[in-house]
Amino acid sequence: MFNKLFNKKSDYKFQEPENTSCFVCSHILDRERPILYVSHDKDDSSWQFLCGHNDHTEDNIRIIGLGQATEIDNSVNDLYEMPKGICAERDNVGDKWTPYKMEE
C-alpha cells in the first residue's frame, strides 16, 4: 500500500502555492518510509514531512515543493487547514492524523 501512494496525482488543497518549499527526510524521497509526522512551524510557516523516526541527521534533509508532498502521499491534504504551531502524527499509512500543539 505504501508504494501505491507515490507518484499519484493529488487534489491539492493547501492555500500556499504548490511550489512552496518544504522539508522532507530522504527516507521519504527514497521511498524507504512513509510520511508519519507533519509540522507547520509557527515562526517561519514552514512545513515538514517526516517519517517519524528519530534517526535523522542534517544529511537527511531535502527540500521539495508542497505539491510534491501531496503527490508522495495524498493524505497530507487532510492537513491543509492545520494552523501554524501545530504538528500531526499517525502510526501507519491510512490511520487518521492526530494533531497537537508544538512544544515551545
Image (cartoon, helix red, strand yellow):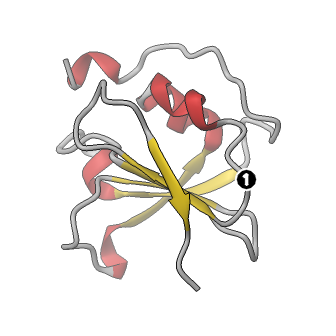
**Crowd band around label 1 with a 10 angstrom C-alpha radius: few (<14), some (14–19), many (20+):** some
Q: Residue furthest bottom?
A: 104
Vertical comparison of 90 with 18: above or below: below
Which image quarter: residue 16? top right
**Residue type at the position of mark 1:** Pro
Q: Give the residue at x 19% y 73%.
A: 55
Q: Position of residue 76 (x, y in %)?
A: 51, 34
Q: Give the residue at x 52% y 38%.
A: 69
Q: Secondary structure at mark 1?
A: loop
Q: Position of residue 103 (x, y in %)?
A: 53, 79
Q: Position of residue 11 (x, y in %)?
A: 63, 14
Which image quarter: residue 8? top left
Q: Is residue 39 visible?
A: no
Vertical comparison of 87 with 3: above or below: below
Which image quarter: residue 44? bottom right
Q: Give the residue at x 72% y 70%.
A: 42
Is 104 or 70 nearer to us in this picture? 104
Is 100 or 5 nearer to us in this picture? 100
Q: Is residue 5 left or right of residue 104?
A: left
Q: Is residue 90 left or right of residue 91?
A: right
Quadrant, the N terminus? top left
Q: Which residue is mark 1?
A: 83
Quadrant, the C terminus? bottom right
Q: Position of residue 84 (x, y in %)?
A: 72, 61
Is 47 or 32 nearer to us in this picture? 47
Q: Give the residue at x 36% y 80%.
A: 58
Total number of numbered labels? 1
Q: Is residue 16 visible?
A: yes
